Image (spheres, grey):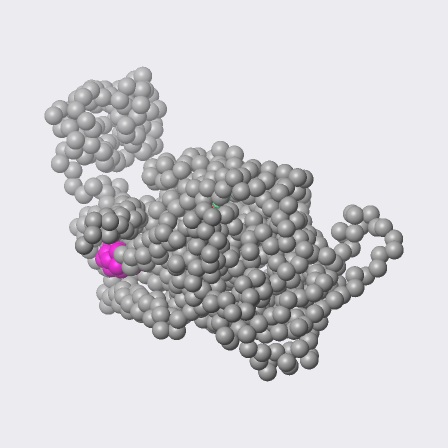
């Protein structure tokens, strides 16, 4: 093979390879969040297949366009006509087949995934009616509690992990849509009148944690504020929580599961009962806070002038357990935000 | 040889030029009116887009409160689609289709004028909501029952304005269909029509079938809002999903109404600037018709998450559209193959169209898969997709048409260096503004939100997108300078500056009233190629030379 041919071959490969590389880079980013539901995993896998096919099509077509621009550019002063191709039936039939094949592959995979998503379990772990309205949510459990938004915080949907969760999606006014990005799924809430059937959505969350969700169907003025949180907990914690709610006690902590360290703090006569405490660095911990008087108090942790954690207020005699996110090693202060002068102490976070 | 001579109407008195433009029924002047009007609305809707992007650049409410924001994107979407992109393409159609057919005017010149003048009227009505307590704010799709229940006259003005604009389009469509079937020059058989004319024909048929459905829906909505009707409001027995069916039965063909003429423009430009014929002319025509037909069977892919539609059917039909679209893409690529590419500005925009429409097409096929749609429906992924089709596709097509036909319309050629600056700023700005939106959507950022949390992790990409939007806006400056400077003192273009092969290049620039003094013989879809490169040239197919029986019939019943 002659060197000129070889080098032009190499250039060709580079020309095709460079955009391919670029697309590889881009495609690495073009991913949905890591799925936290079982159906989400199916959607994610399907997406990867589709993205891969899309990448091939893009690179092939875009690569050809760039190649044609470089290769077939008219030389200055060249006034001759190129050969006048009007068409070629054989080629045209072949390239009709290419998109046809891709379409059928895609459709096959989509339908397979779709049947996974639409599958309904006999015995869902929990059934919750989701009421969407302008511009908030209410979560109603079968013969159980009702969760609303409180104090401007988005409402929380508490569900067990590892079991099918079935939502009955009911709109009280205009259309809304229940969407949690990390679940990779959404479904509309549409009021279909007296004879309509509500949409249902079923998924199994695979990992305990809190997930932000938001209305995805435009529903008027404050649509952007129509948020909620899904809190997925282990079955035990979930049952405890619900039992506590039913008996009227303050429910145990939720979220991060169990606490490795729990600090007990009491407040009375506008005083904390302790002046300092110590916790390990880089691990979540809990504060079991008991307010013993009818004066609002809370516990917040400050790093200098900046709050790193702010606990909810307890306005009357009662208890609450705060989940405090991990702190780095160092010195902090704990304060009641209502009485920062009188109620203050030191926190030592040790390695 | 077919020769057509036409006497211009004798004008014995001089009318003022303002009156002349206000009362004109000349398709060329009306075409220019369409284009100018469209660009004015484009700038208005573009300013709204900049407001939207400024608000979203960083988290927190900066400039627009929630209501103002909701009005901004509703007006932006409505105006861009109904008063910019569709009329801009119709404007080029108005100017170019009769010329390409060798006709003296549109079939119904007065209806043509009427259908133009309804547009600014409708557009101003839609905008006038701002004067009466706020414009419509339900999104361009106006979903029920939100639209049933919203207060304020803005939404009523939006309905009436859209109904007028829809009427204008229907009248225009009738006119195009009549012109294309009845006004072709002798020898101009259907399969010798330029592709742009074909796409305008299919578009006109789509408008004629789809727009009345929208009009009916709008009237029903107006009755619901003002006369106690109950079509769409579930609290009084209506069905809100019915609105979505009606809207998208119109709305999806609408997407092709917007993209087909742009495909036509590109199919004119690529061959001329590659110095080759369009590869696979007939396949292209059939693909266009196939897309038109399929576009009526896919509407519910906008409704996958409603839980009220048959997913496999609509998913499959939607995916099928990829086939004729793929055929077109291959035809365009094969047209470039072994051509002699001239990278003038119209060609740059046409190649830009290919690349950007490719991305919009691919994300469209991804959305056709219901499971994927369940994740990204109503997120910024869809916003990215729709702009890659409408903006990367149709708007690039409009600019390509502008640079390509401006010499014909004014007799002057737009400046090339300025055109190239415009193109590159536009192209880079466009991708900066819209590519990141794919990722935002995958990350779960819903569309139509005026604000987002700083913890959501969407801040950086939103910032990038806003920078891109301002870059697009800046690219309009060289474009405007170019148009104005060329208008005043541009390089004279001559009759056929690009060596085009279709009939519009066979007359003067700009053409005289009634267009042609005489027409060349028409033996193929490239009559001028035939003229310049003559008989016996290797490139001329033997069948181009044959006089067919069809020609004789055409000649006898000559439409002119
Ligand atoms: C300067 C260029 C443009 C920018 C920066 C821009 C930006 C945007 C953004 C950010 C949105 C989403 C708003 C939201 O959901 O909150 C949007 C929506 C939209 N845009 Fe554009 N856009 C531009 C040009 C265009 C063009 C040329 C068209 C059509 C020809 C168009 C059609 C639409 C439509 C139909 C919507 C949906 C409106 C709705 O949700 O009701 N845009 N645009
Ligand atoms: Cu909502």
One can see residue A206 in this view:
yes
Asked if residue A46 is among those painted magenta in the image, a careful observer would answer: yes
> Which percent across, then down, holds residue B396?
50, 51
Spot the residue most to the front. B536
> Which percent across, then down, holds residue A303?
26, 22
Q: Give the quarter of the figure containing the N terminus of chain B.
A: bottom right
Horizontal side, residue A120 vs residue B398: left or right: left
- Residue at the location (52% across, 34% down)? B63
- Residue at the location (60% across, 46% down)? B413
Q: Give the quarter of the figure containing the C terminus of chain B.
A: bottom right
Q: Quadrant of residue B521?
A: bottom right
> Which percent across, then down, holds residue B21?
75, 51
Horizontal side, residue B291 vs residue B17: left or right: left
Spot the residue most to the top. A341
In-front residue for pair A343/B299: B299
Secondary structure of the magenta portion, mostly?
Answer: helix
- Residue at the location (49% across, 72% down)? B541
In-front residue for pair B20/B47: B20
Asked if residue B17 is among those painted magenta in the image, a careful observer would answer: no
Which residues are the magenta region? A36-50
Above or below: residue B4 compared with residue A245 = below
In-front residue for pair B148/B117: B117
In-front residue for pair A51/B455: A51
One can see residue A126 in this view:
no
Q: Quadrant of residue B525?
A: bottom right
- Residue at the location (24% across, 58% down)? A45
């Amino acid at each position: 093979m002659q060197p000129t041919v070889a080098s032009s071959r190499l250039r060709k490969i580079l020309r095709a390879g460079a955009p391919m590389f670029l697309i590889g880079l881009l495609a690495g980013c073009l991913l949905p969040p890591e799925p936290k539901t079982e159906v989400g995993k199916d959607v994610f896998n399907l997406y990867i297949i589709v993205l891969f096919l899309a990448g091939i099509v893009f690179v092939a077509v875009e690569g050809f366009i760039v190649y044609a621009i470089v290769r077939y550019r008219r030389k200055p002063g060249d006034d001759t006509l190129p050969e006048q191709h009007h068409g070629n039936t054989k080629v045209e039939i072949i390239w009709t087949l290419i998109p046809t094949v891709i379409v059928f592959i895609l459709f096959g995979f989509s339908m397979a995934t779709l049947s996974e998503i639409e599958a309904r379990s006999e015995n869902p772990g929990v059934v919750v009616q989701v009421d969407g309205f302008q511009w908030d949510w209410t979560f109603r459990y079968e013969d159980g509690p009702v969760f609303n938004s409180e104090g401007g915080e988005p409402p929380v949907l508490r569900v067990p992990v590892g079991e099918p969760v079935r939502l009955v999606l009911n709109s009280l006014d205009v259309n809304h849509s229940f969407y949690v990005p990390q679940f990779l799924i959404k479904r509309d809430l549409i009021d279909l009148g007296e004879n309509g059937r509500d949409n249902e959505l079923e998924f199994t969350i695979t990992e305990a944690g809190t997930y932000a969700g938001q209305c995805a169907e435009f529903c008027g003025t404050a649509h952007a504020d129509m948020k909620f949180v899904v809190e997925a907990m282990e079955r035990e914690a979930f049952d405890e929580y619900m039992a506590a709610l039913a008996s009227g006690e303050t429910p145990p902590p939720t979220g991060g599961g169990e606490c490795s360290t729990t600090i007990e703090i009491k407040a009375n006569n506008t005083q904390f009962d302790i002046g300092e405490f110590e916790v390990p660095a880089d691990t979540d911990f809990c504060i079991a806070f008991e307010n013993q008087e009818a004066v609002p108090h809370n516990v917040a942790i400050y790093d200098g002038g900046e709050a790193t954690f702010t606990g909810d207020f307890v306005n009357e005699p009662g208890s609450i357990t705060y989940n405090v996110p991990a702190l780095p090693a160092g010195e902090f202060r704990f304060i009641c935000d209502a009485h920062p002068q009188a109620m203050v102490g030191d926190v030592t976070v040790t390695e | 040889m077919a020769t057509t001579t036409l006497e211009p109407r004798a004008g014995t008195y001089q009318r003022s030029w303002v009156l002349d433009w206000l009362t004109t029924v000349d398709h060329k002047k009306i075409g220019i009116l369409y284009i100018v009007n469209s660009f004015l609305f484009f700038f208005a809707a573009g300013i709204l887009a900049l407001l939207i992007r400024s608000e979203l650049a960083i988290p927190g409410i900066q400039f627009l409160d929630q209501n103002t924001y909701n009005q901004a994107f509703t007006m932006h979407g409505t105006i861009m689609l109904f008063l910019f992109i569709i009329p801009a393409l119709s404007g080029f159609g108005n100017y170019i289709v009769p010329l390409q057919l060798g006709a003296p005017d549109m079939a119904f010149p007065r209806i043509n004028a009427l259908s133009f003048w309804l547009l600014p009227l409708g557009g101003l009505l839609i905008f006038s909501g701002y004067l009466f307590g706020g414009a419509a704010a339900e999104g361009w799709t106006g979903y029920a029952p939100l639209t049933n229940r919203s207060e304020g006259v803005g939404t009523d003005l939006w309905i009436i304005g859209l109904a007028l604009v829809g009427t204008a389009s229907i009248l225009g469509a009738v006119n195009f269909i009549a012109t294309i079937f009845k006004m072709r020059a002798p020898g101009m058989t259907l399969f010798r029509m330029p592709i742009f004319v074909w796409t305008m024909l299919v578009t006109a048929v789509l408008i004629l079938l789809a727009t009345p459905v929208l009009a009916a829906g709008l009237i029903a909505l107006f009755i619901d809002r003002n006369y106690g009707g109950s079509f769409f409001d579930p609290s009084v027995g209506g069905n809100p999903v019915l609105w979505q069916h009606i809207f998208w039965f119109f709305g999806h063909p609408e997407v092709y109404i917007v993209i087909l003429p742009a495909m036509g423009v590109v199919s004119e430009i690529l061959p001329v600037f590659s110095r080759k014929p369009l590869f696979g002319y007939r396949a292209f025509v059939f693909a266009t018709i196939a897309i038109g037909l399929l576009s009526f069977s896919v509407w519910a892919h906008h409704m996958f998450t409603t839980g009220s539609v048959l997913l496999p059917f609509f998913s499959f039909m939607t995916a099928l559209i990829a086939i004729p679209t793929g055929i077109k893409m291959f035809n365009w690529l094969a047209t470039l193959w072994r051509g002699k590419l001239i990278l003038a500005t119209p060609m740059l925009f046409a190649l830009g169209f290919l690349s950007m429409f490719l991305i919009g097409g691919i994300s469209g096929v991804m959305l056709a898969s219901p499971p994927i749609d369940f994740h990204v429906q109503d997120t910024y992924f869809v916003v990215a997709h729709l702009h890659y089709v409408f903006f990367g596709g149709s708007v690039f097509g409009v600019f390509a048409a502008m640079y390509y036909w401006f010499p014909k319309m004014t007799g002057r050629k737009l400046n090339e260096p300025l055109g190239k600056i415009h193109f590159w700023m536009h192209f880079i700005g466009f991708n900066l503004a819209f590519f990141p939106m794919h990722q935002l959507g995958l990350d779960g950022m819903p569309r139509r939100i005026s604000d987002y949390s700083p913890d959501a992790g969407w801040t950086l990409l939103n910032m990038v997108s806003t920078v891109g939007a301002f870059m697009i806006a800046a690219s309009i400056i060289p474009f405007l300078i170019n148009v104005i400077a060329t208008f005043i003192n541009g390089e004279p273009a001559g009759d056929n500056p690009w060596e085009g092969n279709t009939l519009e290049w066979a007359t003067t620039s700009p053409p005289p009233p009634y267009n042609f003094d005489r027409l060349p013989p028409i033996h193929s879809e490239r009559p001028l190629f035939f003229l310049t490169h003559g008989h016996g040239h290797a490139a001329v197919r033997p069948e181009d030379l044959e006089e067919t029986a069809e020609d004789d019939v055409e000649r006898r019943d000559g439409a002119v």
